[in-house]
Image (spheres, helix red, strand yellow):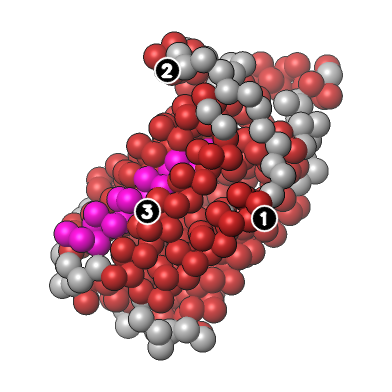
């Protein structure tokens, strides 16, 4: 199911120029189309994370998948801007409900090496993400964009059938204490710093995904080339994630987290001034490497620092802060000058570096003496 969720993230930026023209949208309205999903995810993950700690995780997961499937189908059938925004919200809410439960189920399956299993999960999803825009741009470009949303719905239904018929580990639900749990999570200084890090890095990456297809389309770049630029980013993400699979559970996690924002800032700056395919490719490589170095390592630490009984809720905050970062950054920078865009992304990256350094300070000191403690 995470593959459909990730493919949605990678393919939708490719459709932005076409959807903008078909519905005659302004750049601000297009931002609403992109962000309606992100806002709904931010809300859905908080609800899904809390429900996942309180009720049968698999049932909550199935509820989210069903909403995601219905939302995807409604997007494909939408004939007006208002309907498509509502459908995107339903789709995002469903994705938000089930997405924080995926890493929970994975780390329960591999409690001794949580970082490694998350890296492997991310790399597999990343390879699917890398192939999706390239396949669409080169093979399926003749199909209407709604075909992709129908595909999301079909994959979701198939995943729902697999989950319902499978034997997935679960934990006994606990007594609802929603206010206390939220306070418990947000009182952790390490988690607050990590959430700030996630907000900044994902905000920068989200804006990159929104900005690149529009800029390339305005330069009359064909869809296949836009798909190639996005595929290079996601392929780099997958390759880098595979390389990091044996490092993320070790003391190297601090270095990995702190270098990620630098990759993202340099890559975005290069994209803003790119005028050749080679420059676009290098920008995509840098941003993809930054995403790999920030994604699974930060999630692994969020789950490590999560207070007992709040794993799903902490994971939901992880995704919620990521999506809110993307929404705010896109709205703030969409109509800005190139200089302000580069300055904004560079500022977010600098804040993320400081947050990563502080969040892992105590962990790094302990790890230097007992590396085996970096395990969940």
Contact, CB < 8 Å: mark 2 with mark 1?
Answer: no
Residue 72 picture quarter:
bottom left
- Tell me which numbered mark, 2 or 1, is placed earlier along the sequence: 1
Label 2 or label 1, whichever lies nearer to me, is 2
> Does any portion of residue 194 appear in the rendered image?
no
Distance CA(mark 3)–CA(mark 1): 24 Å
Q: Is residue 86 magenta?
A: yes
Q: Position of residue 229 (x, y in %)?
A: 50, 71
Q: Position of residue 46 (x, y in %)?
A: 41, 32
Contact, CB < 8 Å: mark 3 with mark 1?
Answer: no
Q: Which residue in the structure is indicated by mark 2?
A: 178
Distance CA(mark 2)–CA(mark 3): 25 Å
Q: Tell me the magenta residue range.
A: 82-101
Would you call the spot at circle 1 few (<14 residues within 10 Å), some (14-19), or many (20 or more)? many
Q: Quadrant of the C terminus?
A: top right
Q: Which mark is residue 123?
A: 1
Label 3 or label 1, whichever lies nearer to me, is 3
Determine whether, in the image, residue 88 is placed left or right of residue 228.
left
Determine whether, in the image, residue 109 is placed left or right of residue 347.
right
């Amino acid at each position: 199911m995470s593959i459909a969720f990730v493919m949605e993230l990678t393919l939708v930026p490719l459709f932005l120029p076409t959807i903008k023209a078909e519905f005659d949208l302004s750049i601000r309205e297009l931002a609403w189309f992109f962000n309606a999903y992100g806002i709904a995810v931010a809300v859905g993950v908080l609800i899904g994370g809390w429900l996942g700690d309180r009720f049968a995780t698999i049932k909550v997961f199935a509820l989210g998948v069903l909403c995601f499937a219905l939302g995807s189908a409604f997007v494909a059938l939408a004939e007006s801007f208002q309907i498509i925004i509502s459908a995107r919200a339903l789709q995002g809410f469903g994705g938000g409900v089930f997405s924080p439960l995926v890493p929970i189920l994975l780390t329960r399956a591999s409690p001794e090496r949580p970082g490694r299993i998350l890296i492997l999960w991310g790399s597999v999803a990343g390879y699917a993400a890398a192939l999706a825009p390239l396949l669409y741009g080169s093979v399926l470009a003749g199909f209407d964009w709604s075909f992709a949303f129908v595909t999301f719905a079909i994959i979701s239904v198939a995943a729902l059938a697999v989950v319902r018929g499978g034997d997935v580990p679960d934990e006994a639900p606990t007594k609802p204490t929603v206010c206390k749990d939220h306070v418990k999570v947000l009182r952790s200084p390490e988690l607050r710093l990590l959430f700030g890090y996630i907000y900044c890095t994902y905000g920068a990456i989200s804006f990159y995904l929104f900005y690149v297809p529009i800029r390339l389309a305005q330069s009359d770049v064909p869809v296949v080339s836009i798909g190639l630029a996005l595929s290079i980013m996601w392929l780099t993400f997958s390759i880098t994630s595979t390389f990091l699979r044996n490092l993320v559970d070790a003391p190297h996690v601090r270095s990995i987290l702190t270098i990620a924002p630098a990759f993202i800032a340099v890559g975005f700056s290069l994209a803003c001034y790119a005028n050749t395919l080679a420059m676009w490719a290098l920008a995509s490589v840098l941003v993809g490497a930054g995403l790999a170095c920030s994604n699974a390592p930060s999630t692994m630490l969020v789950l490590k620092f999560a207070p007992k009984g709040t794993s799903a809720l902490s994971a939901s905050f992880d995704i919620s802060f990521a999506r809110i970062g993307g929404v705010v950054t896109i709205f703030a920078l969409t109509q800005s000058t190139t200089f302000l865009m580069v300055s904004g992304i560079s500022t977010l990256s600098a804040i993320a570096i400081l947050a990563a350094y502080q969040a892992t300070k105590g962990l790094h000191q302990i790890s230097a003496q007992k590396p085996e403690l970096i395990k969940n």
